Image (cartoon, helix red, strand yellow):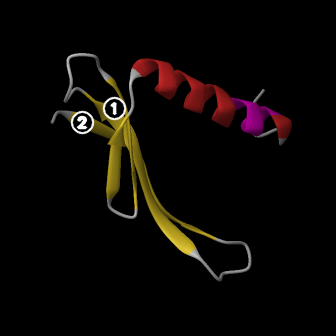
Amino acid sequence: MAATMYFDETLKDQGDKNSIDVEIGHSSFYSEDSIYINVDGKLVIMDRAQAKRLVEAIVSVGQYHDFIK
């Protein structure tokens, strides 16, 4: 699988009680290039429609919190 990683971090709960390992990137494993996400070692390569919904949701949350314009 050809992949380019864009995010690789252990996310921690604000209360420091829980954490998860998250990796997100581009994948060309299937004929349709898309986004992969790996959470605690469980990998999913999304189809483009599902990847688009995920990105739109993350952008919306970022805009709500004024992280992005």
Judged from the image, the secondary structure of the residue bearing numbered disc 2 is strand
**Where is residue 8 drawn, in percent x and y?**
41, 54
Question: Farthest bottom residue?
Answer: 17
- Region in magenta: 59-63
Q: Is residue 16 above or below residue 19?
A: below
Q: Left or right: 30 with respect to 16?
A: left
Q: Is residue 28 left or right of residue 64?
A: left
How far from the left and from the top, in percent, is residue 48? Answer: 42, 20
Relative to residue 8, is residue 57 drawn left or right? right
Q: Is residue 5 above or below residue 28?
A: below
Q: CA distance from mark 1 to mark 2?
A: 5 Å
The kind of secondary structure the magenta stretch mainly shows is helix
Return the residue at label 1: 26
Residue 39, relative to residue 47: is it above or below?
A: below
The residue at 48%/27% (across/down) is 51
Three-letter code for the amino acid on which mark 1 is drawn: His
Q: Nearer the viewer, residue 52 or 5?
A: 52
Q: Are marks 1 and 2 in contact (CB under 8 Å)?
A: yes
Q: Under tag 1, what secondary structure?
A: strand
Viewer-proximal residue, 26 or 47? 47
- Tell me the number on the disc at residue 58: none
Numbered disc total: 2
**Which residue corresponds to mark 2?**
3
Picture coordinates of residue 4 (x, y %)?
29, 36
